[in-house]
Amino acid sequence: MAKTIMIQGTMSNAGKSLICAGLCRIFRQDGYKVAPFKSQNMALNSFITEDGFEMGRAQVVQAEAAGVSPRVEMNPILLKPTNDTGSQVIVNGEVLSHMSAREYFAYKKQLIPDIMKAFHTLEEEYNIIVIEGAGSPAEINLKQDDIVNMGMAKMAKAPVLLVGDIDRGGVFAQLLGTLMLLEEDEKEMVKGLIINKFRGDKTILDPGIDMLEERGGIPVVGVTPYLQVEIEDEDSLTERFGGRNEAGLIDIAVIRTPRISNFTDFLLLENQEYISLRYVKNRSELGHPDMIILPGTKNTMGDLLWMRQNGLEAEILKAAAKGTVIWGICGGYQMLGECLSDPQGIEEGGSMKGMGLLPIETIFAGQKTRTRVQGRFQHVEGLLAGLEGIGFEGYEIHMGETILKSPAVNGKNYDMNVIKDSVKDAKGLDGCSKGNIYGTYIHGIFDKEEVVRAIVRALAEKKGIALEDKKGMDLKAFKETQYDLLADSLRQHLDMERIYKIMGLGIEARD
């Protein structure tokens, strides 16, 4: 059976996901077959596996770091918030139902068999399982029937490393306070402490570490630095929304709606030399970008209403009238249409007018589309016509069905993409292009360097800028370098020999 190690944190965004990814990479480098695992994830960023199941992106990143294919057993429960008090509950990659927070709290213990079936499946196939907790194990109002922190540690019989975030201040209080709020048998499961996101001279910190170990009775197994690595985030607290400070020659604005999802779609765009990509949440921040992106969202109608009320929709319509490139992905694509209908109350219920920029309408339904696709741009109008013929791959996750109200007008075909559904092995069409307005359901549409290069070239030419045609970034290769960089840094700052012994391997960490 696999050896296990569990990473829990003193709070959300303490760095659990990143440390798990780094450990997955280290164990892989050391010759082990590794799988990540998180029993319950709450996130709007999700992913579709090769067999068409939905899971959280944090475990996808960790699987990539481990050099294995993401599979739904790595994240058997995914909660996707639809509002402040309710979530879509996804079990084993498929939608179970929509539940309020109170309903789910009362129900979740019934999901333990699903959790343990997934865990045991991984346990039989891998040498090491790196388990991630959620939030804090010391949330005393949530500890009853816990299935993701100490409850999961007990079920998996996994030793725990507790991570505190020194960058936010009060790390000693975080760690000691968490230990104080644990039951005695839970505290016994904590075998090491990690101080994360440290900047500065560690010798100044050393006296505090001595006191922490003395008062907590648990060794500090590492002081990890504030890591400068480009690895996908999934948390709503991501620092990615802060954007780049320096101005690029090409300015792209992503509308940061309240329920933005799958903002990992923009990782390649964010790392282009000529581009400044900004996340915008009000009119004053929008400015006059070269391109505006409406991203995915868990509540299309609610987020469109938010834009309508705060004036962003009006600014986007003005920009569209002036010829600015507007691109919608998934929920953003739905917003660009003429009408949104929700007869079953999947989102807000009723119907509402869309932005009217594309000749489409969307009807929400209870069945979710979950699939992976490959395709190419077949008909692209306007400034980005150079995309025609370029291939892409990605995935779809959406509850609505979108139809073209005017498939062709005066001989113009508005269908933008030809796709092949990898799960159903069927061909079809996706998306719409009209003038400088573009929409698609495909997440990952900007992950190909050739696609990004064509967009950047077209936007630059419109501004009369001649850009040097440099070789772009291979996203897959770039990710590999970042995982290696993460692992190298953690090896320097974690006591890997002690961690291996905590796991019961009883061997020294290898070079």
Image: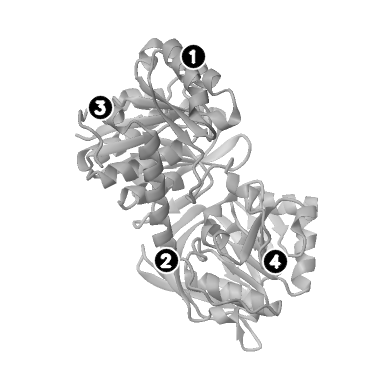
**Label 3, on which residue?**
501
**Label 2, on which residue?**
373
Label 1 with label 3: CB-CB less than 8 Å: no
Pointer 3 local density, CA inside 10 Å: few below 14, some 14–19, many at least 20? few
Pointer 1 local density, CA inside 10 Å: few below 14, some 14–19, many at least 20? some
Q: Earlier in the sequence, mark 4 or mark 1?
A: 1
How far apart marks 4 and 2 lie (CA) works out to: 26 Å
In the displayed structure, 136 sits above or below 364; it is above
How far apart marks 2 and 3 lie (CA) works out to: 43 Å
The amino acid pointed to by label 4 is Glu
Residue 469 lies, in percent from the top left, at: 54, 77
Pointer 4 local density, CA inside 10 Å: few below 14, some 14–19, many at least 20? some
**Label 4, on which residue?**
338
Residue 147 lies, in percent from the top left, at: 41, 28
Mark number, residue 181:
1
Residue 247 lies, in percent from the top left, at: 68, 60
How far apart marks 4 and 1 lie (CA) works out to: 53 Å
Label 3 with label 4: CB-CB less than 8 Å: no
Which element is circle 4 on?
Answer: loop
